[in-house]
Image (cartoon, rainbow, N blue to C red):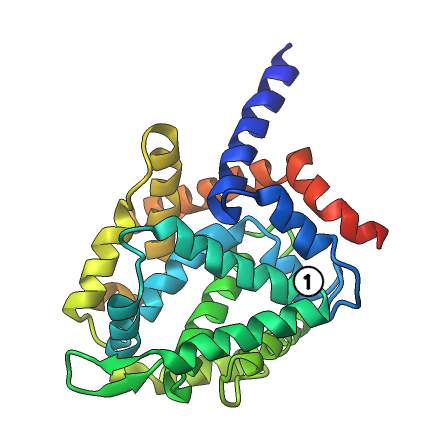
Amino acid sequence: MARMLVSAVRHKAALQLRARTAGDDPTGRARAIWGSPGERRFTPTDPIWRVHSNGTMFLAGIRALLLQSLHPVAMAGVAQNSTYRDDPWARLQQISGFISYTTYGSIPDADRLMARVSKVHSRIAGVAPNGRAYRASDGDLLLWVHCAEIESFLDVHQRWSRTPLTRAEADHYVEQTQVAALGIGVPDPPKTVAGLHDCLAAYRPALEGSTEALDVARYLRKPTGLSGASLLSYAGLYRGAVATLPEYARRMLDLDLPAPAHQAALLAGRAAVRSIQWVLDDPLIQDDRRTFKQL
């Protein structure tokens, strides 16, 4: 009886998580990604598959958004051309869809999506609060967003995955992420972990805790559409995301914590990741991927 109750609780959580990340028709999207015939670029043994299918991605995604917000021009592009405040879950579904298609989808499907994203970027332009004109297709901005995202995914995976990557596998992961990056116009994305860190370091002089960045940090602390147990679970993810940021990023975002609170936030983050992974182990989530294994 107890085992059945636990399974029912996990299944309910899996349904909610699947709906949050996949939208109104999660079964249809799963079939489109996993069930579409055709050659894939990556396999379940590849580092990119292992990282992107892990429960660490949920916390890492929050960390990436916080880190990305520190570039004032990139942040202006999001603030001026995104509806993340009005419908944050739609934005989450777009991001998770892009990662899923380019990691697990057929090559033709992934290529079509990358071309569509590039076309959208080419139409977005504006002026940041610091007076700098920008286009979403600017290579400098695309490279920053890519590197901040991939470093976040890798950092959290290496901290809290059950099976962290070896040094060689981590380099291979960074190299594999070049495919999607090049597909949307990122110029010369890094190929190694060392190159990834060097690239991020080169952006340090351009980063700041702008009004927009601080606003994002406040919003991400308690986004709309969450309550009860969902909000409690999210709080652990957010605290862990903040605690894993580089020290300079926490200072810029006014999120630095004394040592005891920092350690408590790390523990909360690890517990939240383990909880997410437990949900992802539900048969419903695994069934989404079974079709691929039968292709």
Question: Could you tell me which residue is drawn at 32 percent across and 56 percent down?
Answer: 242
Q: Nearer the viewer, residue 77 or 181?
A: 77
The residue sitting at 49% across, 84% down in the picture is 186
Q: Is residue 136 above or below residue 79?
A: below
User: Would residue 173 be found to the left or right of residue 96 on screen?
Assistant: right
Q: Position of residue 9 (x, y in %)?
A: 54, 23
Residue 177 position in % (x across, y down)? 59, 74
Image quarter of the C terminus? bottom right
- Residue 257 seen in the current view: no
* Residue 133, image quadrant: bottom left
Residue 5 in view: yes
Image x and y of residue 168, in percent:
67, 74
* Residue at 62% across, 67% down: 102
Which residue is tagged 1?
105
| Residue drawn at the location 59% of the way across and 79% of the way down | 178
Q: Quadrant of residue 44?
A: bottom right
Residue in the foreground of this view, choosing between 57 and 75: 75
Residue extending farthest top: 1
| Mark 1 element type | loop
**Vertical side of 172 occupied by 235: above or below:** above
Q: Quadrant of the N terminus?
A: top right
